[in-house]
């Protein structure tokens, strides 16, 4: 169901008018991608499903405020990311402040070489899911969702240096996990 941007906007307008079929079509258009975004952050299928439903409920409830400054998908994705982060915060995920820890204490294996790591996408996805919540969240938001460190810092309400540290450590830990698999 690959709709054009114009068709998606028309679908949003039909939802704003209260057409129930349009709500269903809009959900079907975005549900899988938004679920995957939630799952990458939360690493829990039940939580991702719950956050997805809450995100759509919030989006549909606030559809009247959507002003096309961005695409509907971008707007919905921001809702999903924010709700996923809030769910992580309920778990009390700690994002390490870069100023509080020496980077030399990361326990990394200096022999890891990214260029030598040629693994299948599924292996990498499984390895990402094994990362601690904070690492996985920052890595997913930066690499997979396309946010920059300043945006991630704003979403997580931490310093940009903290997201950079988390990202660097996440990459190191991911490479360590991948190396152990070989």
Image: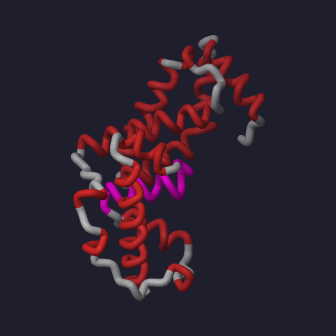
Q: At x 45% / y 25%, what residue is drawn?
A: 58
Q: At x 59% / y 24%, what residue is drawn?
A: 23
Question: Does 107 sit above or below residue 161?
Answer: below
**Figure quadrant of the C terminus:** bottom left
Is 24 left, or right, of 44 in this rendering? Answer: right
Q: At x 50% / y 54%, what residue is drawn?
A: 142
Question: Does 162 sit above or below residue 25?
Answer: below
Q: Is residue 85 magenta?
A: no
The magenta stretch is 132-147
Question: Does 169 sit above or below residue 46?
Answer: below
Which quadrant of the structure image shows residue 139?
A: bottom left
Q: Position of residue 86 (x, y in %)?
A: 33, 38
Q: At x 52% / y 50%, what residue is drawn?
A: 148
Magenta segment, prevailing SS (helix, strand or loop): helix
Q: Position of residue 177 (x, y in %)?
A: 37, 76
Q: Position of residue 83 (x, y in %)?
A: 39, 36
Q: Is residue 142 magenta?
A: yes
Which quadrant of the structure image shows residue 17?
A: top right
**Figure quadrant of the N terminus:** top right
Is 160 left, or right, of 121 in this rendering? Answer: left
Decide which of 160, 31 is in the foreground and name it. 160
């Amino acid at each position: 169901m690959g709709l054009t941007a114009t068709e998606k906007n028309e679908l949003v307008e039909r939802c704003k008018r209260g057409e129930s079929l349009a709500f269903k079509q809009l959900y079907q258009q975005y549900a899988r991608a938004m679920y995957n975004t939630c799952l990458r952050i939360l690493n829990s299928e039940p939580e991702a499903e719950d956050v997805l439903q809450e995100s759509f409920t919030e989006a549909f409830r606030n559809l009247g405020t959507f002003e096309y400054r961005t695409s509907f998908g971008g707007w919905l994705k921001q809702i999903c990311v924010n709700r996923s982060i809030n769910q992580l915060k309920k778990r009390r995920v700690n994002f390490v402040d870069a100023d509080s820890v020496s980077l030399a204490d990361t326990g990394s294996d200096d022999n890891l070489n990214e260029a030598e790591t040629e693994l299948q996408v599924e292996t990498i996805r499984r390895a990402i899911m094994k990362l601690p919540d904070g690492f996985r969240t920052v890595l997913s938001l930066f690499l997979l969702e396309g946010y920059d460190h300043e945006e991630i810092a704003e979403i997580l309400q931490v310093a940009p240096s903290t997201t950079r540290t988390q990202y660097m450590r996440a990459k190191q830990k991911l490479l360590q996990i991948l190396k152990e698999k070989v």
